[in-house]
Image: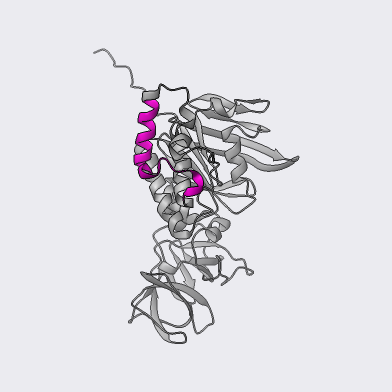
């Protein structure tokens, strides 16, 4: 019997490949050895505090900044290496800026059509009409930017960037000038629109809620590097780095000791999780307890006193103090309205045990901003 040739295993190539890039500003390194890929139709975020290099990374992808090291490729075509940068207009990339950058003398319709000037009139009108409908701007098409709200202006900027059907859309802090409620709503709308158009996107933001709402993958950046590139779920429940744990979500660190591969000894009693601990038995560790790990339970074996509370609609975020003076954060359903100073009972339900080697300066510190 003739042997059959082995079938080749084929994997689709990423749309965008960022390979160990480096960039300087005024001679000072801003990003170093930065690498990530973006698949077709995928939406990702570069998330981090101000000055971490995320906007510089976006500008290198757009073609606005040269590289000192590494390479950037789109569709396996090299678009940036040291000494060579393909101009932005030749990259099939759209960009939405923080300040919208709309043309004040053009109507909404004409702003959207600006990048389609070389298209036949019929095609141009059809594309503009489709985007007006998709962004909910149909009844505002003849207005000028100064006659629009911030959210409406952002929709115009988005529609204008999408009009030429770019391969990739870059969004640089696009919602930072909007109020919280509008920011959250628009981030979901933009995700839905990009998914429906089949366009890949990269969002740069310091707001983890925006990144979570929009992204399939997120890269948490610090000092010009990506510390963890992962799904929003894994970043929250399985941070690989203490900075990532600090930056994502809320919570408190408490001290503990590794008791076994799946258990930690703490002042709250033994805690066990589904994932094995990566530290040797006996290691002193700091354990991150998230608010959703601390569950209200009238029969719970942990009694605590309410020290602070923040109403969040469907939930109330409580700061609870244990008899040992350790403080934890806990989310209660909003109809569990306990006054300050009252005693409550809780239990710990932490499926994911997040711990790092003991660092006494961080023990029992709040890892995010004070309760707003």
Q: Position of residue 299 (x, y in %)?
A: 33, 81
Q: Position of residue 92 (x, y in %)?
A: 50, 28
Q: Camera-side residue: 225 or 78? A: 78
Q: Camera-side residue: 355 or 247? A: 247
168 versus 8 height, above or below: below
Task: Look at the image and name its color scheme.
Answer: one colour
Q: Position of residue 355 (x, y in %)?
A: 51, 62
357 versus 125 height, above or below: below
Q: Is residue 112 left or right of residue 205?
A: left
Taking the view exactly as shown, the residue that stands out farthest to the top is 2
Taking the view exactly as shown, the residue that stands out farthest to the left is 1
Q: Is residue 152 visible?
A: yes
Q: What residue lies at 65% left-to-right and 42% top-to-bottom?
A: 31
The quarter of the image holding the N terminus is: top left
Q: What residue lies at 49% left-to-right and 30% top-to-bottom?
A: 115
Decide whether residue 141 is among the magenta residues: yes
Total marks shown come to 0
Q: Position of residue 180 (x, y in %)?
A: 47, 59
Q: Quadrant of residue 165?
A: top left
Q: What residue lies at 62% left-to-right and 32% top-to-bottom?
A: 70
Taking the view exactly as shown, the residue that stands out farthest to the right is 27
Q: Which residues are magenta?
A: 123-148
Q: Is residue 238 visible?
A: no
Q: What residue lies at 42% left-to-right and 53% top-to-bottom?
A: 233
Decide whether residue 134 is among the magenta residues: yes
Q: Main secondary structure of the magenta part?
A: helix
């Amino acid at each position: 019997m003739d042997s059959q040739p082995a079938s080749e295993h084929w994997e689709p190539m990423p749309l965008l490949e960022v390979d160990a890039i480096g960039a300087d500003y005024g001679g000072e390194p801003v990003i170093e050895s930065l690498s990530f890929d973006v698949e077709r139709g995928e939406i990702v975020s570069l998330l981090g505090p101000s000055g971490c290099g995320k906007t510089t990374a976006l500008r290198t992808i757009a073609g606005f900044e040269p590289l000192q090291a590494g390479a950037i490729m789109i569709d396996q075509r090299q678009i940036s290496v040291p000494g060579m940068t393909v101009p932005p207009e030749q990259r099939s990339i759209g960009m939405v800026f923080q300040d919208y950058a709309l043309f004040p003398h053009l109507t909404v319709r004409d702003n959207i059509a600006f990048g389609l000037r070389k298209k036949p009139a019929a095609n141009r009108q059809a594309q503009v009409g489709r985007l007006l409908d998709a962004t909910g701007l149909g009844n505002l098409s003849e207005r000028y930017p100064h006659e629009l709200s911030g959210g409406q202006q952002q929709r115009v900027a988005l529609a204008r960037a999408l009009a030429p059907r770019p391969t990739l859309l870059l969004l640089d802090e696009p919602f930072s000038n909007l109020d919280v409620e509008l920011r959250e709503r628009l981030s979901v709308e933009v995700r839905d629109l990009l998914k429906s158009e089949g366009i890949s996107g990269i969002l740069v933001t310091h707001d983890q809620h925006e990144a979570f709402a929009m992204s399939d993958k997120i890269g948490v950046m610090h000092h010009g590097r990506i510390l963890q590139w992962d799904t929003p779920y894994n970043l929250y429940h399985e941070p690989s780095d203490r900075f990532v744990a600090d930056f994502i979500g809320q919570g408190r660190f408490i001290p503990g000791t590794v008791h076994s591969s799946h258990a930690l000894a703490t002042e709250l009693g033994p805690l066990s999780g589904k994932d094995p601990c990566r530290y040797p038995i006996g290691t002193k560790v700091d354990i991150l307890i998230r608010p959703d790990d601390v569950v209200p339970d009238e029969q719970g074996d942990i009694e605590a006193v309410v020290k602070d509370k923040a109403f969040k609609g469907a939930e109330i975020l409580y700061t609870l103090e244990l008899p040992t003076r350790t403080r934890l954060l806990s989310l209660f359903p909003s109809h569990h309205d306990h006054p300050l100073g009252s005693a409550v009972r809780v239990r710990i339900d932490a499926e994911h045990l997040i711990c790092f080697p003991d660092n006494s300066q961080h023990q029992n510190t709040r890892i995010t901003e004070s309760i707003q």
